[in-house]
Amino acid sequence: MKKLSYLWTLLLALMVGVSFVSCDDDDEGDVGAPKELLGTWLWYGEEITFNANGSGVLVEDGESYPFSFTYDAASKTLTVSADGEVMRWTIVSISNSKMVAVDEDGYEDVFLRPGASGGDGEEGGDVSQSAPEYDTSAPVDLPDAGRYADVSGKYEVNTTEIPYSSIELTAGGQYVAMKASSYPYSVKAVARKTTKVAGLFNRRPVFKRNFNNSILVAGSFEQISDNEYSLEGFGTLVIDGRDGNGNISAFKLIGSDGTVTDVPVRKAANVDDDLTGNSGNLCRMWTTVEERAQYYMERIAIYDAIYRVDADDVTTYVNRYGIDWAEDGIFDTGGDAMVRVLFSQAGTYLQFYRDGSMELSYWKWADKANGTLYAYDEGEMADGATATAVFYGNRVNVIENFTDYSEEDDLVLRSIYTTVLEAAY
């Protein structure tokens, strides 16, 4: 969800300007067409049929438009005629399941037999695997994420004695500390890949973890005694005060060298104070299992592929028009792969990548009851992304939809991008 840059080029391929409305079907002779050409093809959401006697029919939105055609074997030219209009294709390659042809304007068209995949997009071979289905019928059975609910929250620091603007403790036992002067002024946000369509799991500012000048420090924490918590790689926090509502108002920070610093804080408002239902399911650390990209053109599936994170491997199930996932930036793989993601009750949305980088954004509910969440960057709420979280077993499918409609070409492109996350224990 997400990765449509390649598909916009298909719009050009559809601008052929030919209207098939009627014909004079008098040619009953064999036109010498190769046997692989004969029969019915899928052509960008429409059906086109070539018969041995030189007749044919185009089916568009349930309407049938007859035509006639000829074939020149020497030049491999297919000429289609309908109501005085003529269109020519030069056949580049043809098999029983796929035909590639170039029209008079130089655009490449791909024709597929019904049910054919169209190849893997890299070497052109047919894809024989069956695309999996997600079984979301199992009841949600996630591990308890409320172990530290009594101290969870984002605490804004009210002192310059430590170089952090906030310290957040999550109910599941993770912490995130933001350096005071690092964002948004002293660090330039860098987009991971500018060719992608903005979505929940891409095009976020990249924050590299730098041990000499850390922008973010994140890790797990454990309670070691009453009111005392050890933060991995950060220090020890001791609760030193609460306000009239029982919220923590002060910590003592004990550094690795034993230095003790008073840290007055103010607890920020949570996205949701109720850690039940979808909030209780979502607010935790997750590991990434796989990412799936599905493209549809006029309700017909034209691409379906899954990137499995652990194996760092992409499997393509449907590829009707030769999309190359690597060239077109469908998935972030290798060091760019997202391996973990944290959603906190305070609205923090933090992604962890295989190369050690982290990306910080924020989230809120758009529709809690239906699992619809909205993620955005600091100061850019209007440019955020919406997704739907479907929980089952110890997993969640985070599903993003992207739709583009072109009135000029009467074409609808739809992309579904699914990220499968598994609750971290």
Image (spheres, helix red, strand yellow):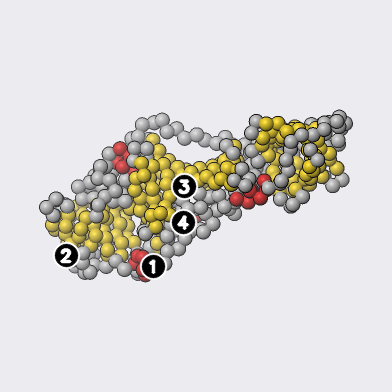
Residue tagged 3: 310
Q: State which quadrant residue 24 falls in.
A: top right
Pointers 4 and 2 in contact (CB under 8 A)?
no
Element carrying mark 2: strand
Whole-Å distance between the Cαs marked 3 and 4?
A: 22 Å
Whether tag 3 and tag 4 are in contact, CB under 8 A, the answer is no
Query: Residue 239: percent from the left, percent from the top?
Result: 16, 56
Q: Residue at x 79, y 34 (%)?
A: 23
Q: Which residue is mark 2?
A: 262
| First in sequence: mark 3 vs mark 1 | 1
Whether residue 328 appears in this view of the structure is yes
Residue 311 visible in the snapshot:
no
Question: What residue is disc 4 on?
Answer: 203
For disc 1, the marked residue is 187
Question: Would residue 319 appear left or right of 185 to someone viewing this image?
Answer: right
User: What is the C-alpha distance between the residues marked 3 and 1?
Assistant: 31 Å
Q: Which tag, 3 or 4, sits closer to the chain's start? A: 4
Element at label 4: loop
Q: CA distance from mark 2 to mark 1?
A: 27 Å
